[in-house]
Structures are given as C-alpha cells and as structure tokens.
Image (tube, grey):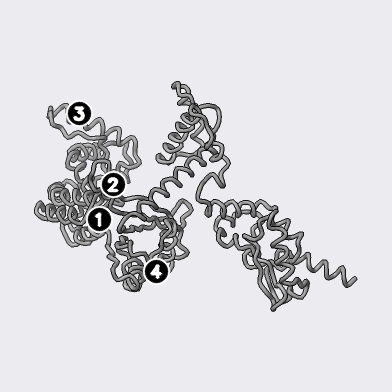
Amino acid sequence: MATKRIASESEGGSSSSCSGSQLKRRAVSVATVEKWITDYDKAFNTATWLKYEKADRSRVSCLKYSVYERFMDKLRGYRNFSLAFIEGSANLRTSSLKDHARSTMHEVAMRLLKKEQSASVFEYAPIARALSGLEKGTEEKVRKLFDIAYFIAVEGLAFSKMKPLCELQQRHGVNLGETYRNEQACATFIEFIAKDFRNQLTKALHDAKFFSIQMDGSTDSGNMEQEMFMAIFFDPHGDDGVVHIRSKYLCVKQPKSVDASGLFECLQDAMSCIGMDCETSKLIGFGCDGASVNMGERGLRGLLCSSRPWLITIWCLSHRLELSLKDALKQTLFTNTCIDEFLMQIYYVYSKAPKKCRELEEVTSELKSLLDVPDFPAGHGNKPKRACGTRFVCHKVQALQRILDRFGAYMNHLITLSESPSTKPSDKQKLIGYLRKWRNSRILLGCAAFHDILQPVSILCKCLQSEQLCIVNAIEAILRTNTAV
C-alpha cells in the first residue's frame, strides 16, 4: 500500500515545478540523468534542450527544458503550456521525458531553435529544399509567385489574397503552375524575402564604417506597446556612383517595460538581430523623440552615453519643430481669435453629414458658374479638411488652404441651412451662433495670415522627413525657411 501511495504521488507531480516537498518523492542520481541525455540524444536530441538542477552533489532535484525560456512569448498560446517547463519539472521519469519530446509544443520550440541557429533556410524549411532543385521553367513560375507574395507584403494585404491574385494573373495569361498558390506558401515566401532583406542589411551594416539607429514607439491592434527601429548608414556602392544615405527598417520589438531599462534592453534585442550589440563602436548616432524616458539624463540617453561617450543623441528635428510651433501658437492670434477652434468646428459640421456635403457641392458648382472665374480654386472635394493630425503643421496648412479656397461656399451654404425649415431648431441655433462668429473679417484675415506664415514651415517639415536628409541639408533648409518667414 505504501508503494502504491508513493507511485501515485510521483505521478501527480508530473506538471509541477521544483519544490522541497517534491524532492522527497523520487530520487534520481546525476549519473542516471546524464545517461538519459546520452541514450535519448539520437532519438530526441536531448543534449540540446534537456538540463537539470542538483539537489545535492549526487542527486537531481528537477528537469528543465532550456529551449522554452528562449521562446516563451511564442509558446504561451499553446494549450499545454506550463511554467513548469521553464522553472523545472519534478517528474523524474523517462516516460514523462519521452511524452514531452513527442508533444506538439516541443516540436514547435525545436523548430524555432533550429530556425534561429541555421545559417540557411534549407535546413529548416522543406519548401526551400523543394525549390532548390527546380527546373528552369518551374523556377520562373516560382519567381512570379515570389513577386506576388512581395506585393502582398508591401501593400499590407492578407495572406489569403494569394490565391485570388494568382487566379487573376492566370486569367491574364500568366502561367503560375498549380502549386504554392495558398496562404501558407505566401507566408513562407514572405519569410524568405524578409530573411534575405535582413541578411542584406546585416552585411551592409557590418561593412559600414559607422551607422545610426532611430527608434519610435507605438501600439499594435491589441494595444500592446511596440518599438520600431530603423538603421541609417552611408552606402558608397550605389549604381550611379553616388554615395547615398540609406534608411532601412531593422525590426519591431515589444519592450518588457517602457522605462529606461526596459527600452535599453529592447534596443539590445534589436541590435542582436544584426549580430551586434550596443557596445559596438560603429554605432555613433541615436535618434528618438523628446520624451523624458528617452532624452532624460536618467533615461535611455543617459544609459547609452554613460558607457559610450562618443554617441551622438538627436531629438527628431521634425518632431521638435512640430512641438515648438504648437507651443508658440498658444500665445498668438491663432488661438486668441479662435481660428484653431473655427477649423475644428467647421470640420465637424460636415464630417459625418453626407446630405450637407452633397448640398455644399451644389452650392460650389452654382458659385463657379455664376462668378464665371476661370481660375476658380480646384481640388479634390469641397469638404473642410481636418486640422488635427500626427503632422501638426501640414494638417493646419491643408485645412487653412481649403478654407481660403471655399470660404464663400461654406458661408452661403451655412446661411441657407440656418434659414431652412427642415433644419432642427437646435441645429439652427448652433449654426446661427457659428455664423455670428465666422462672418467676422478677423477669421478670414487670420486664416490668410497664418497660412502664409506656416506654409514655409510646412515645406521645412517635409524636408526634415526626407530619407536622404543629412545635417548639411537640414541646416540649409532651416536657414531658407527662416529667410522666407
């Protein structure tokens, strides 16, 4: 009875992590576990992933599966995932070891490890081995399929679009064959393309004498914080014989935290993607926005510069310019004369009102025919543009330009709406209040004045966002804008 009770307790601890009480249930020597690793290595490759912790000099306390800790984020979604695989399992039996080695989750983990360690895709992707021995005609078909997959990736389309796009191409007379036309093949093709781009970027950065890294944060569809990294370097080997400034996508990483240490660790992970770390002397520049966690002395900038005194940290010029202008306009006629409020209110009058937009189109057409002006301002649509957006200056300039082009049409239409019996009384009173403010000459004159002021700054903002920007061009653009303003 005692033997049965002990065996039952040992089986019950199969998925639990190491603890003091579980060590008494079954004692396995270190020599025994070492023998397991040797004997099962041929069948299950145990030398790669099976580790153990010692209870004392001769006994093993628990088994650990080292591969899981590396790919924990990717394996969490599997049904049988348990932290015991990472912290250690007290079930010291060969049957448990074999069952684990045959599990789907273990196969996924080993495939991820092989993919990470392999230098060639032929080692882990069966489709790559199949493609390596293709005949010339078949190779041309697959090349076209790669082009379609690349188009899907660049345009941000769903992988399921692979099949209908292939059918469309076939209707146009393009011979694509009958295989590799599904979303699984599309995902594999894109993976190969991404790996090739990564290898090209890695080689370019290793060959470069120096480079810089840009970082910016955002959130994904699940509202999880993500950090995107870009690499900037000189390319002296251009086809036209000219040295070019290359700005290439490096990677997107999810930080464990958005404090300075978490962002620094995230940057280290990004650098590891190209086989480097932040200690490399080739990294001479780092660009980000002006948040205190980035540019503060105790922030990411402080951590980087403490051991890298040569590093130049730059607050994004365009972002800094946008914030400076936003602060500068707070104490000007732009806000005191309610121009900013006017731009927002007139946008929302028409934003979700198809009937008003249709009537505005008719008013604009009538004014154009009555005035008989050959140079009547042209443009795509008549609805007011939104003045608030990620690009503060550019959005303001576009909204002001639309107001200046269509101000007469807006006022005529709003007067008609305020006098129409079909308009709700509450809306009618709101429109009358708007018109009382908006028909003041200060509104139109203010829009014209600030449009002339912000127009050169808008051009400067676009210049500072160019991929071919260098410090000389930036200074020249700033001086040119200063003269224009």
Question: Which label sits in the foreground, 3 or 2?
Answer: 2
Q: Secondary structure at mark 4?
A: helix
Number of other residues with Cα within 10 Å of mark 2, as a class: few under 14, some 14 to 19, many 20 or more: few
Front residue of 321/151: it is 151
Residue labelled with disc 1: 318
Q: Quadrant of residue 423?
A: top left
Residue labelled with disc 4: 260
- Alpha-carbon distance for marks 2 and 4? 37 Å
Label ID, residue 99: none
Instruction: Say which residue appears at 46% left-offset and 47% top-offset.
Output: 195
List x then y, in percent, for residue 188: 52, 41
Instruction: Say which residue appears at 40% left-offset and 66% top-offset.
Output: 264
Asked whether the beta carbons under mark 2 and mark 4 sit within 8 Å of each other, the answer is: no
Going by the picture, which residue comes out furthest to the left? 483
1 or 4: tag closer to the N-terminus: 4
List x then y, in percent, for residue 409: 20, 37
Instruction: Say which residue appears at 45% left-offset and 33% top-offset.
Output: 143
The three-letter code of the residue at mark 1 reads Ser
Camera sees residue 342: no
1 or 3: tag closer to the N-terminus: 1
Residue 132 vs 276, above or below: the answer is above
Residue 371 vs 75, above or below: the answer is above
Q: Secondary structure at mark 3?
A: helix
- Alpha-carbon distance for marks 4 and 3? 60 Å
Asked whether the beta carbons under mark 4 and mark 3 sit within 8 Å of each other, the answer is: no
List x then y, in percent, for residue 418: 25, 40
Residue labelled with disc 2: 237
- Alpha-carbon distance for marks 1 and 4? 23 Å
The three-letter code of the residue at mark 2 reads His
Residue labelled with disc 3: 366
1 or 2: tag closer to the N-terminus: 2
